[in-house]
């Protein structure tokens, strides 16, 4: 069965968004240090505020989209705000200006993410949701492959600076707005308000036991899922040159692109929980390997294999969220889902960094593997698996 036009359009929206974003994000630390003359502290302040903002707004936007019955307005505003603010980093002369632009960029991400996921789930047949989310994530990762490579080519041209690259990132961002306005459609009945009053306690109860246990398992897993910057640091300390790391990051995104495409389709065939459990077990194995492998060649192989984990989990988790909750609360559910992952990411990185500095890299990676094992055990015993083919009635909005 062919994917809905809106899902395909949102896939291209994510492709061009990450195309634009990844022209800037990998170069931001270099821009701050070499152009603006600031270091790690400024970068930490900028990214900490930006990502925390996005996490909180994902919860708000999910609740708002269910209360209003509309998804597309927040999606358009979110992508537009980010697309406008992000390239303006190229005009910065002081680091607080970068902070403001990153803050606006992450506000946009926070506003759009939960309504977008709810829209994808709402327009897709329940038995095809894994495929839909897999396609969307694959297109997202494809943009992450292209963006850094285009930036590298531009910087190789005579007279092109970091500022020029950042400003040129506005071009793919403009394509995003065109696609959103012309190709993304929200079903008319999605505009009907499901609830005119906000009752968080009642809505939380209606989300159901299984969804709450899934959130708990995700939180436990996320506490061991630190920023991928630590993996890059591990490669660097093993002697992998900086130029290779940039290429490896692009190849890693390519592996994620392929794995999410196939993983989403597979979750429709074998179920959500088996794929997530397999993915978390694979994650634990990857972290175990990072703890015990010391050669640069071995770490490169493990790092590239790490991209397979995303194929098992990303589409399956989102499809399962949609399967578990009532149709009228999908936005709220995706808000809690995205929020719990975002908010758990900060302590995860703090825990990992503390363990690395205090007891060494082996302890840090083994602890991450332990969190993944604990989350798998919790998921295995606490959450039931609904059959998407039996929940077609949940397609009502």
Image (spheres, helix red, strand yellow):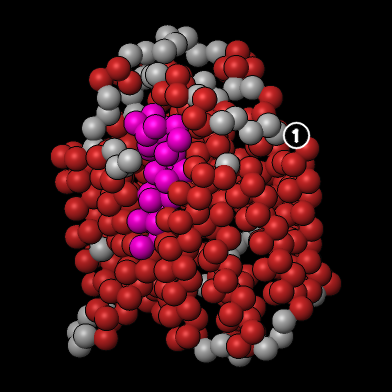
Secondary structure mostly seen in magenta is helix
Residue 172: where, in percent of width, then height? 23, 59
Quarter of the picture holding the C terminus: top left
- Residue that appears at 58% across and 81% down: 300
Q: Which residues are magenta?
A: 115-142
Pointer 1: what residue?
A: 382
Q: Nearer the viewer, residue 335 or 82?
A: 335
Q: Is residue 239 visible?
A: yes
- Residue that appears at 74% across and 70% down: 288
Q: Is residue 333 above or below residue 351?
A: above
Residue 283: where, in percent of width, then height? 66, 61
Q: Nearer the viewer, residue 113 or 87?
A: 113
Residue 21: where, in percent of width, then height? 35, 60
Quarter of the picture holding the N terminus: top left
Element marked by disc 1: helix
Instruction: Give residue 325's quadrant in the image.
Output: top right
Extreme-right residue of the structure: 359
Residue 228: where, in percent of width, then height? 58, 66
- Residue that appears at 44% across and 74% down: 251
Q: Is residue 139 highlighted in magenta? A: yes
Crowding around mark 1 (Cα neighbors within 10 Å: few <14, some 14 to 19, many 20+) is some
């Amino acid at each position: 069965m062919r994917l809905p036009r809106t899902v395909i359009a949102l896939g291209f929206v994510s492709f061009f968004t990450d195309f634009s974003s990844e022209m800037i994000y990998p170069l931001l630390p270099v821009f701050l240090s070499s152009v603006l003359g600031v270091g790690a502290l400024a970068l930490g302040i900028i990214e900490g505020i930006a990502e925390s903002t996005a996490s909180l707004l994902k919860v708000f936007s999910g609740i708002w989209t269910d209360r209003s019955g509309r998804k597309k307005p927040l999606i358009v505003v979110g992508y537009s705000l980010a697309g406008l603010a992000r390239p303006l980093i190229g005009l910065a002369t002081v680091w607080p200006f970068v902070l403001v632009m990153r803050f606006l960029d992450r506000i946009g991400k926070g506003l759009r993410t939960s309504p977008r996921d709810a829209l994808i789930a709402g327009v897709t047949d329940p038995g095809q949701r894994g495929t839909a989310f897999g396609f969307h994530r694959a297109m997202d990762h494809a943009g992450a492959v292209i963006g850094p490579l285009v930036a590298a080519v531009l910087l190789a041209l005579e007279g092109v600076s970091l500022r020029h690259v950042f400003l040129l990132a506005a071009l793919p961002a403009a394509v995003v707005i065109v696609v959103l306005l012309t190709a993304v459609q929200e079903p008319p009945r999605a505009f009907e308000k499901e609830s005119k009053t906000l009752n968080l306690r009642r809505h939380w109860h209606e989300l159901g036991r299984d969804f709450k246990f899934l959130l708990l398992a995700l939180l436990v897993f996320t506490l061991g899922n630190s920023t991928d910057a630590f993996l890059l640091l591990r490669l660097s300390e093993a002697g992998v040159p900086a130029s290779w790391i940039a290429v490896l990051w692009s190849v890693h995104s390519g592996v994620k692109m392929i794995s999410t495409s196939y993983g989403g389709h597979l979750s429709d065939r074998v179920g959500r929980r088996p794929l997530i459990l397999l993915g978390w077990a694979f994650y634990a194995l990857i972290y175990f390997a990072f703890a015990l492998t010391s050669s640069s060649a071995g770490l490169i192989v493990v790092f590239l294999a790490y991209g397979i984990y995303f194929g098992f989990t990303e589409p399956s988790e989102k499809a399962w969220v949609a399967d578990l909750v009532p149709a009228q609360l999908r936005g709220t559910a995706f808000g809690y889902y995205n929020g719990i992952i975002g908010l758990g990411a900060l302590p995860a990185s703090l825990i990992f960094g503390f363990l690395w500095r205090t007891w060494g890299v082996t302890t840090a990676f083994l602890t991450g593997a332990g969190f993944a094992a604990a989350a798998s055990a919790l998921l295995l015993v606490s959450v039931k698996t609904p059959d998407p083919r039996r929940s077609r009635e949940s397609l009502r909005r």
